[in-house]
Image (cartoon, rainbow, N blue to C red):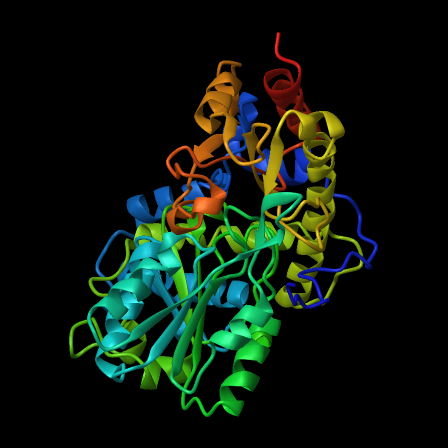
Amino acid sequence: MNSQPESSAITMTTLTTPLDVQTECRAHFPSLQSGFIFADNGGGSQCLKDVADRIYDYLLNSNVQFGAGYSVSIVSTKRGTVDPQKAAAVLFNAASPEEISFGGSSTILIENLAHAMEPLVNEGDEFIVSFADHETNVGPWVRLASHGKAILVPWQPRPVSPNDNPYNVALSMDDLKDLITSKTRLVAFTACSNILGAWTHPKEIAALVRKVGAEKGAKKIEICVDCVGYAPHRRIDVRDWDVEYAFFSYYKFYGPHIGVLYTRKSSLDNSLTSLAHYFLKDHEKLEPGGPGYEVTYGTTGVLPYLLSLAGNSGLEGKSDGELLDVAYQRIAAHEEELMKPIFDFLLSEEAKKAGVRIVGPESGKVEVRAPTISFVVVGPDGKTKRLQSKDVVAKVHSQPGIGIRYGYHYSHRLLARPDLGDDPADGVIRVSLLHYNTTEEVQKIVDILNGIIVSPN
């Protein structure tokens, strides 16, 4: 039996004004004006106009080398490094902007993190790694362990209701507790799986890791949390969670294609070697060569947009953190409305008889999951696919103006498990929504899926 904490990523107890999705949200995304239904947001969100405008402005008006004393270079330095670090620090709730590093993607950032950590890893150190994750937070630790000093300890999700729906799997706190030993050095997991869609509760996991690690005599345990599938939906709080490393991708968070990593100052100082030029400052040690600075400046357009979603009523004098709390409450309330029509369909008796099985929690409640929704269509044995995922998605795409996706979505190790199918390339059908989607869009997707799966012509 899974031992999951009772607390949730957000509790809908505070009354908030519903989002005006058209004026407060969609008006800021030019691509949404086409009417195309973007429902592959787990692979990448649409980009804010303000983000694109900032990239354009940087390249045309401040595209010079950093660190010089002339006026344009001073502006360029502030735009390309200072402002992006400050904005990202707010989004992580980091203690200092110096705890922020940028890289071409989250994948390269965690590859760099593992590479910087490796010289200080001791023989026999154990790395507990969730296999419910995107490969970004798995592969680097697998490769580090394969070099011979560290030992990889997989944390596998287990079936929640194997007799009813074997595809409903989740990470178990009880399993994690049993994996921790005196040799545990790192625990890596996701805050929200890009396949399962479930919250994992980083604060509770971190508390368990610290407690059990101390009881078993572990000398040093650090925690690395993948927030890529979490950041667009809920507020990150690395200090409240008590984690050393966390990261997300701005291109899945309304911005340009770049990743950002939080590293606790004590870990930056004591757990990592530098990958940068030897004469550069410690806070640059995870940015060899530096990021594309026009792109980092573009990321500064994301925070003002999120703050604007708090609304204008009665919020004078509130901190950025308080405004983000309100904004995310409003986002969550709208996401629950988005999930209702699709879960009404997926959990209907008709869909179940047609072989629909949700991959992950069978709930559309915001306390349980994000609107990242995966499912398969199986035959009478409950395991073998009656309809291939790629065929279902192809039929959806035969209708103009809609984008969803099938496959393993870079969570190959999860979907390569025999109990979750024998063809990870075909993987799952995934509908991944964001707050700028509308209930009308979701209903259109549902109607098409119903016609393909339940009531084909």
Q: Splitting the image into 4 quarters, where does residue 55 fall? A: top left
Q: Can residue 221 be seen in this view?
A: yes
Residue 316 vs residue 345, the one in the foreground: 345
Give the x, y percent position of residue 8. 70, 62
Image position of 223 (left or right of 8)? left
Residue lying furthest top: 457
Q: In which quarter of the image is residue 107?
A: bottom left
Q: From the viewer's side, name the closer residue of 402 and 316.
A: 402
State the residue in front, 192 or 109: 192
Q: Position of residue 71 (x, y in %)?
A: 29, 62
Q: Residue at x 56, y 27 (%)?
A: 379
Q: How many marks?
A: 0
The N terminus sits in image quarter: bottom right
| Side of 161 relative to 303 (left or right) | right
Residue 272 sits in quarter: bottom left
Residue at the limit of the structure toward the front, as seen here: 381
Image quarter of the C terminus: top right
In-image side of 272 versus 226 (left or right):
left
Can residue 245 be seen here? The reply is no
User: Quick one: which residue is furthest to the left in this view?
Assistant: 278
- At a point 45% along the width and 76% down the height, the residue shown is 244
Q: Does residue 203 sit above or below 22 in this rendering?
A: below
The location of residue 371, given as percent across then percent down, is 62, 43
Q: Is residue 216 above or below residue 261?
A: below
Relative to 314, is 366 above or below? Answer: above
Q: Which residue is more in the foreground, 48 or 103? A: 103
Q: Which residue is drawn at 58% across and 61% down?
A: 200
Decide: is 408 above or below 206. above
In the displayed structure, does residue 399 sit left or right of residue 283?
A: right
Return the x and y of residue 40 as percentages of the image width and height. 50, 35
